[in-house]
Amino acid sequence: MKSSWQTGVGFGLTSGVITTVGLMVGLHAGTHSRVAVVGGILTVAIADALSDALGIHLAEESRPAAMTLHVWEATLSTFVAKLITAGTFAIPVLLLELRTSIIVSIFWGLVVLTALSTVLARQQGLAPWKAIGEHVLVAIGVVTISYYVGLWVKTLTE
């Protein structure tokens, strides 16, 4: 895979999982509303995907030797990867009871991060368990913090 596409897909998948699952857990803890969770997923899938794509675009453009094609490929692949990844989290929310869908989404997110971590570690000749452990630990931290922030926000509105 070209480095521009690898940059975008790697960033888009990671950000898609971490941002979407964190938002879902926080919104669920604070509202227990399927509408709020679906709205959050769609917002991440569209607005945050565009924001991340622009961020990658500017970061790649800031490199002195950046080729225009490389910049645009990284931009497009970031947007598409994040849009699709975030969008996959809407499926369990629409099909399952909300609490169950949150659990399924956390599991799905960890599967995606584990697969991506394994591929990247093997490409770099590293032990996959180290990369998996690091990335899963960050994801669990985000989920935990998001949960408690959601509970805290709920107390502000009661």
Image (cartoon, rainbow, N blue to C red):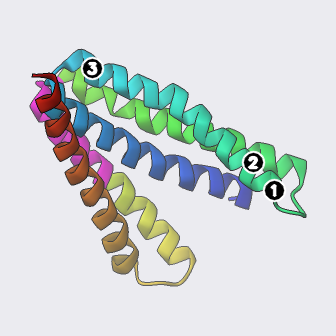
> Residue at the spot x=55%, y=41% of the render?
81
Most extreme residue toward the top, as rendered? 35
User: Along the polypeptide, which appears first: circle 3 or circle 2?
Assistant: 3
Circle 1: element type: loop
**Pointer 2 local density, CA inside 10 Å: few below 14, some 14–19, many at least 20:** few
Against 135, residue 152 (above or below) is above
Name the residue beneath numbered marker 1.
62
The tag earlier along the polypeptide, 1 or 3, is 3
Q: Is 15 placed left or right of 36 in the picture?
A: right
Mark 3–mark 2 distance (CA, rounded to whole Å):
31 Å
Going by the numbered disc 3, the residue's amino acid type is: Ala
Answer with the quarter of the image where residue 102 lies.
top left
Are the two marked residues, 3 and 2, in contact with CB atoms closer than 8 angstroms?
A: no
Q: Which residues are magenta?
A: 96-110
Crowd class of label 1 (few under 14; some 14 to 19; many from 20; radius 10 Å): few
Q: Which mark is residue 36?
A: 3
